[in-house]
Image (cartoon, rainbow, N blue to C red):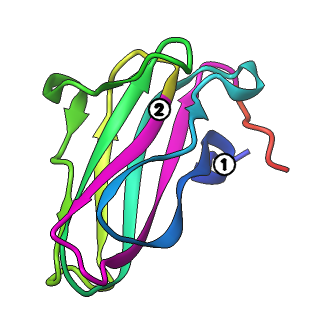
């Protein structure tokens, strides 16, 4: 059988697409060991709609236990975490993760917004230790 990305990757929403104004929002946790397949790699994808104003700083957070969260160290990232501004309408940002924690989520802090911006984030987990990933 020819290997395909569909068989070794799965996308999970971490931040629902929504209009965001001032404050911090933490995304839903994504378990890299879902279905006991222990994904060895992940990528955060941030997708924007209309960003009217403000600064929307997105970070990737990690956890061993889905309760104590910390920002991923730069050494465990591939690329730079994005900060969305009014010049980032309809944009896509990718951030690779090469750390070893079990859980990931996106977190965004918005400041200086009057009307804000619409965007969401997805985590793609891939290269499980056991293949294939079961899609539902």
Question: Residue 50 appears in which quarter of the rendering?
Answer: bottom left
Say which of 39 and 112 sits in front.
112
Q: Could you tell me what secondary structure mostly forms the magenta stretch?
A: strand
The image shows residue 30, relative to residue 98, as above or below, that is below
- Real-space Cα distance between discs 2 and 1? 30 Å
Q: Which mark is residue 106?
A: none
Question: Residue 17: percent from the left, percent from the top?
Answer: 52, 70
| Image height of 124 relative to 52, above or below | above
Badge 2: few (under 14), some or many (20 or more) residues near its Cα, within 10 Å? many
Residue in the picture at 21% in, 39% down: 78
Q: Is residue 13 above or below residue 131?
A: below
Which element is circle 2 on? strand
**Does residue 81 appear to the left or right of 91 in the view shown?**
left
Q: Is residue 105 magenta?
A: yes
Identify the residue at image location x=40%, y=25%: 62
Which of 3 and 51 lies nearest the eye of the viewer?
A: 51
Q: Which residue is mark 2?
A: 104
Q: Quadrant of residue 131?
A: top right
Query: Which span of residues is magenta-colored?
Result: 104-130
Residue at 17 percent across and 83 percent down: it is: 86
Upstream in sequence: badge 2 or badge 1: 1
Q: Position of residue 82 (x, y in %)?
A: 20, 57
- Callout 1 secondary element: loop
Q: Is residue 49 left or right of residue 82?
A: right
Dot label at residue 2: 1
């Amino acid at each position: 059988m020819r290997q395909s990305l569909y068989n070794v990757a799965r996308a999970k929403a971490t931040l629902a697409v929504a209009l965001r104004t001032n404050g911090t929002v933490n995304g839903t946790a994504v378990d890299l060991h879902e279905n006991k397949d222990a994904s060895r790699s992940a990528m955060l994808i941030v997708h924007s709609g209309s960003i009217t104003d403000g600064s929307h700083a997105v970070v990737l957070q990690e956890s061993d236990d889905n309760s104590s969260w910390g920002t991923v160290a730069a050494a465990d990232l591939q690329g730079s975490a994005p900060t969305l501004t009014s010049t980032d309408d309809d944009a896509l940002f990718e951030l690779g993760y090469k750390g070893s924690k079990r859980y990931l989520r996106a977190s965004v802090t918005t400041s200086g917004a009057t009307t804000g911006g619409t965007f969401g984030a997805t985590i793609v987990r891939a290269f499980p230790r056991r293949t294939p990933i079961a899609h539902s």
